[in-house]
Image: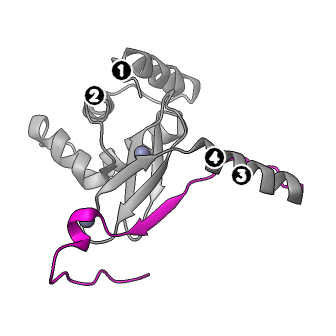
Amino acid sequence: MATTTGREEKDVFTAFLTKNHLKRSEQREVILDAFLRSERHLSVDDLLHMVQKKRPDIGRTTVYRTLKLLQAAGLASELALDGQSRFERDWKRQHHDHFICKSCGAIFEFSSPDIERLQDEIAAGLGFVIEGHRHHIFGLCRRCVSRPARAAAPMR
Ligand SMILES: [Zn+2]
Ligand SMILES: [Zn+2]
């Protein structure tokens, strides 16, 4: 899970903007910088808070739109969770899946060659061509499961 310095990602984003006839703005660069500094699964509001420490003039819509551009450029991937999307770095990262705590929102990454192999075999048996997948496994993390009076998270 090597973290690049982000220089390569900046180049990729610049190329993406040029290709799509989009402006290279200073606001977008500040947002990309903040995104690249984080190793977490960020909600739009998480990133907004990071950005606003430096630039209170940047609004939520700009942050959201920039994240969608980063996604289109292959630099971010979106986890569409119940009610809230989260974004993580995706450039040259190995495929992985997620355990998600429904109580506190903690996210744990995992990857299993066995699971990947099994689903390839099942797909082959069905003649199904896999283009991608995301496993989101919901439940309670170790801390939340042992909390005595936990408020039940709404099941959706
Ligand atoms: Zn939890
Ligand atoms: Zn992840």
Residue density around tag 3, few if under 14, some if 14–19, many if 20 or more, within 10 Å: few
* Closer to us: 37 or 143: 143
Q: Look at mark 2 in the image and give the residue it sits on.
A: 33
Q: Which disc is residue 118 wearing? A: 3
Give the magenta-colored segment's residue range.
127-156
Instruction: Please say whether residue 100 is visible from this viewpoint.
Output: yes
Amino acid type at mark 4:
Asp
The number of callouts visible is: 4
Q: Comparing marks 1 and 3, which lies closer to the viewer?
A: 3
Q: Comparing marks 1 and 4, which lies closer to the viewer?
A: 4
Q: Look at mark 4 in the image and give the residue it sits on.
A: 114
Amino acid type at mark 3:
Leu
Q: How far, Cα to Cα, is label 4 from label 3?
A: 6 Å
Q: Identify the element where label 3 is drawn.
A: helix
Q: Look at mark 1 in the image and give the residue it sits on.
A: 6
Residue density around tag 4, few if under 14, some if 14–19, many if 20 or more, within 10 Å: few
Which image quarter is the N terminus in? top left
* Closer to us: 57 or 152: 152
| Lateral position of residue 108 relative to residue 119, left or right | left
| Lateral position of residue 130 relative to residue 78, left or right | right
Q: Comparing marks 1 and 2, which lies closer to the viewer?
A: 1
Amino acid type at mark 1:
Gly
Residue 74 picture location, percent across and down: 53, 34
Instruction: Please say whether residue 57 is visible from this viewpoint.
Output: no
Residue at 27% of width from left, 71% of height from top?
Answer: 103
